[in-house]
Amino acid sequence: MAGFLMSYNFTDFIAAKTARTSYRFSTSTGGRYRTRWFWRDCHVLDISLEGIRLGGASRLREGQKLQIALPVIGRLDATVRWIEGDEAGCSFSSALDPVLLDAYVLSVSSNRQQ
């Protein structure tokens, strides 16, 4: 699996120097979230095995539970950890499967090149 990760352009990685335990992949794709009944559009700014940063999420509040829907990955349960302007940092209830994250990143990368 390590050889597979080496095929990525490492400028797409955002190395975390704080308490983070996994790399974040910078993206600029669409997604959706809901806190109860209504789905809202958002932008996926970056994603890791443990969490996601969403843009267009000004309606969210710190500590709020939500569900996030992403192409390739599907639906994920998460909690809002911080809000800054219209961006929200969320942690997933359980870590993503690395294979799903790889598939998502490859899908996003191939969409950028088209």
Image (cartoon, grey):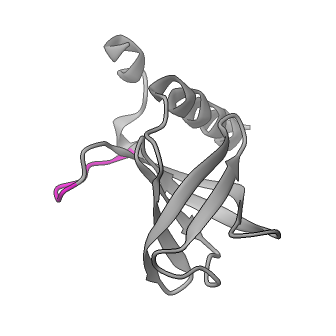
Give the x, y percent position of residue 84: 45, 83
Q: Is residue 12 magenta?
A: no
Q: Foreground: 66 or 2?
A: 66
Residue 33 falls in image quadrant: bottom right
Quadrant of the image containing the C terminus:
top right
* Location of residue 23 by image quarter: top left
Residue furthest bottom as drawn: 85
**As drawn, which residue projects farthest toward the right?**
38
Q: Is residue 17 magenta?
A: yes
Residue 3, compared with residue 61, is above or below; it is: above
Q: Is residue 69 left or right of residue 53?
A: right
Left/right of residue 57 with respect to residue 96 in the rendered view: right
- Picture residue at 65% right of the left edge, 57% below the top: 67
Relative to 8, is 19 on the left or the right?
A: left
Query: What's drawn in magenta, residue-wise?
Result: 13-19
Q: Which quadrant, please, contains the N terminus?
A: top left
Q: Majority secondary structure of the magenta segment? A: loop
Q: Quadrant of residue 12?
A: top left
Residue visible at 47% across and 63% down in the picture: 90
Q: Residue at x 47, y 50 (%)?
A: 93
Q: Position of residue 32 (x, y in %)?
A: 73, 60
Q: Position of residue 8 (x, y in %)?
A: 43, 28
